[in-house]
Image (cartoon, rainbow, N blue to C red):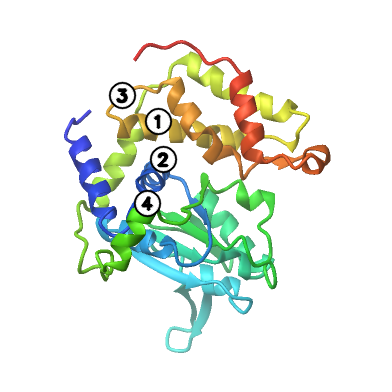
Amino acid sequence: MNENYLNIIDAVRKEINKVVIGKEEVVDKVFMAMLAGGHILLEDIPGVGKTTMALAFASVLGLDFKRVQFTPDVLPSDIVGFGMFNGMSQEMEYKPGAVVCNLFLADEINRTSSKTQSALLEVMEEGRVTVDGITRMLPEPFIVMATQNPCGSVGTHNLPESQLDRFMIKLSMGYPAVENEVEILKGKNNRQLPEWINGVITVEEFVRLKELADQVFVHDAVYDYIARLAKATRESKDLSLGLSPRGSLALCAMAKAMALMKGRKYVLPDDVMNTFGDVAAHRVVLSSSARVEKKTAKEILIKILQGVKAPRIKA
């Protein structure tokens, strides 16, 4: 493994944190999900920097970036593309949709129709689009970063479990701390991309980083730990829907990416613990009794973590 990768990762984080002030942990987890080949769902109120973060990552990682503001009139063809008859060639030509890029920002994804949302299912799972019976692969890497506002429910369509399951992690940025907001008010964060942010690596180098993350070693005991955590969510009386096998794979991939970012060639149980909530919370469904008792997914998952014994693996 090339030890220089840690310097590259640190440079990427520092560059992103120039414009996303005071959210180092969120930036790290978004970067981990990208290294793990996953998609990110950001659920938060407007104005906390979700779009800025997407733009920053696109600039720093050299990714081709496209953004769609999801509204009720956005059609599936706007997302995946469509076929148009060419009178000159007398053939149908494919007109690419917005997803033909490296980083696709689906802004307020819950404000479009279920039909348009479902257009992303194949794209997110398999990295390809099928139009007029012809399947086309998307560029590598391909990452969806979606946002939604949890406060307003009028005119929104909740994402179905099948689509939530395709997001590797779900995060919330939250309000800035007082000292960070002071920096914003002073204008230290009033910077326009891409002028105030530098590209750190190329797309090819980012793909290489993803390969390094995938090569991180996972001990059989850690695989067993992940499987036991997933089993515990499925057997919990507080959950009517537990972690899917896709969720288990996502948890393993996130743990490997965390190990890489910490400079390790192997996964520790702590890596699994520290990513479990972000991977599992949006995938599980609370039981009716848990909702009556006003429990939260976060509380239930913490209890499951405490109840499942972690293996002892020395660093």
The residue to which callout 2 is attached is: 36
Q: Are marks 2 and 1 in contact (CB under 8 Å)?
A: yes
Indicate which label's residue lies in the foreground, 2 or 4. 2
Mark 4 or mark 3: whose residue is earlier in sequence: 4
The image shows residue 72 at horizontal and vertical percentages of 64, 76
The image shows residue 214 at horizontal and vertical percentages of 37, 33
Q: Nearer the viewer, residue 100 or 181?
A: 181
Seen in the image, is 92 located left or right of residue 163? left
Q: Residue placed farthest to the bottom in the image?
A: 87
Per the rendering, the mark at residue 141 is 4
3D distance between C-alphas at marks 4 and 3: 22 Å
Q: In this view, does 11 lie above or below 255?
A: below
Mark 1 or mark 3: whose residue is earlier in sequence: 1
The structure residue drawn at horizontal position 28% and vertical position 54%, both measured from the top left corner, is 16
The residue to which callout 3 is attached is: 265
The residue to which callout 1 is attached is: 256
The 10 Å Cα crowd at callout 3, few under 14, some 14 to 19, many 20 or more, is: some
Q: Is residue 286 above or below residue 307?
A: below
> Given the image, on which type of amino acid does mark 1 rest?
Lys
Residue 243 visible in the shown view: no
For numbered disc 1, what is the local secondary structure? helix
3D distance between C-alphas at marks 1 and 3: 8 Å
The image shows residue 17 at horizontal and vertical percentages of 28, 53
> Given the image, on which type of amino acid does mark 3 rest?
Lys
The image shows residue 107 at horizontal and vertical percentages of 50, 67
Q: Nearer the viewer, residue 39 or 26?
A: 26
